[in-house]
Amino acid sequence: RESEQYEDILVTPNRDYYRDINEKLLSSLRYAVDQGFDFILKTDDEYCVDIDVVKELIRERQGNSQDDIYMGLHRFNGDEYENMKGSDGTIAPFMSGWIIGLTRNLASTIVGEGWVHSMLVAPYGTSSDDANLGKWVDWATRKYNMTVQHLVDQRMKIDVIPIQEPEAKENVTMAMEETEKVSCGNHDAPTCADCPQGNGEDWCHGDCVWLDGECLSTNERM
């Protein structure tokens, strides 16, 4: 009903399985390119994007430059974990976190001239769509001699804090004594490895990233 009333849900011809996550991302990028959007953001649905901050960041970076932009909340070099590398050992930096963005021209190259390369991701890619997007950006940069600015900024996210009933005083005291936890997206856990609780990639967000069946920290370095 929401889709019929507001037309705010895009249905893509992809199976809702994690193994098809790369095809879902490419379908979404292709739709955005076809619609003529100048800048494309991919975000987890439990977070809100501060659009004013994003627009200001784009203005600051672009100025009079025609360089493309690839942005996110975290930037990996692509070699921090072994399973970030492609099946053939390919290494490429990539953005991660709950918000990732790129300019239309860059996205158009990935799903246009580079469509076959992007779809045939298995030889050089991983199970992570974030990591593979970085590989597609890196490939487009080298193949077509593009200049791409990598932008990392934490200000793009608006924290949405759920309303909770007041806790008893003893519960508040207990919470203050708990050890620091990581954000998994919609819940917290002692470590990123504890986030999934048997639910896989859907429970691995926030401070963590899902790579080849593991929930890993975006801040930890090996």
Image (cartoon, rainbow, N blue to C red):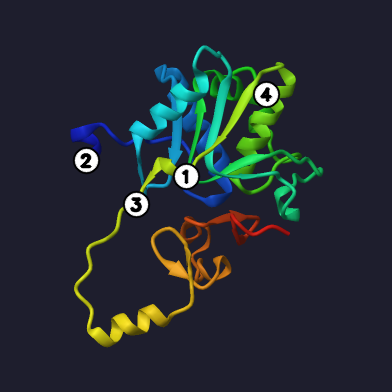
Which label's residue is closer to the chain start, 4 or 2?
A: 2
Q: Quadrant of residue 82?
A: bottom right
Q: Is residue 131 or residue 48 the one in the foreground?
A: 48
**What amino acid does circle 2 point to?**
Glu
Q: Residue at x 57, y 40 (%)?
A: 22
Q: Dot 2: few (<14), some (14–19), or many (≥20) neighbours within 10 Å? A: few
Q: Are marks 4 and 2 in contact (CB under 8 Å)?
A: no
Q: Dot 1: few (<14), some (14–19), or many (≥20) neighbours within 10 Å? A: few
Which label's residue is closer to the chain start, 3 or 1?
A: 1
Residue 45 seen anywhere in this rendered image of the structure:
yes
53 to 165, vertically: above or below: above
Kindly identify which numbered label has been placed on residue 118.
none
Q: Position of residue 131 (x, y in %)?
A: 63, 43
Q: Secondary structure at mark 4?
A: helix
- What residue is shown with label 4? 140
123 to 208, vertically: above or below: above
Which label's residue is closer to the chain start, 4 or 3?
A: 4
**What amino acid does circle 4 point to?**
Ala
- What residue is shown with label 2? 2
Kindly identify which numbered label has been placed on residue 159.
3
Determine the CA span between mark 1 and mark 2: 31 Å
Q: Is residue 166 left or right of residue 18?
A: left
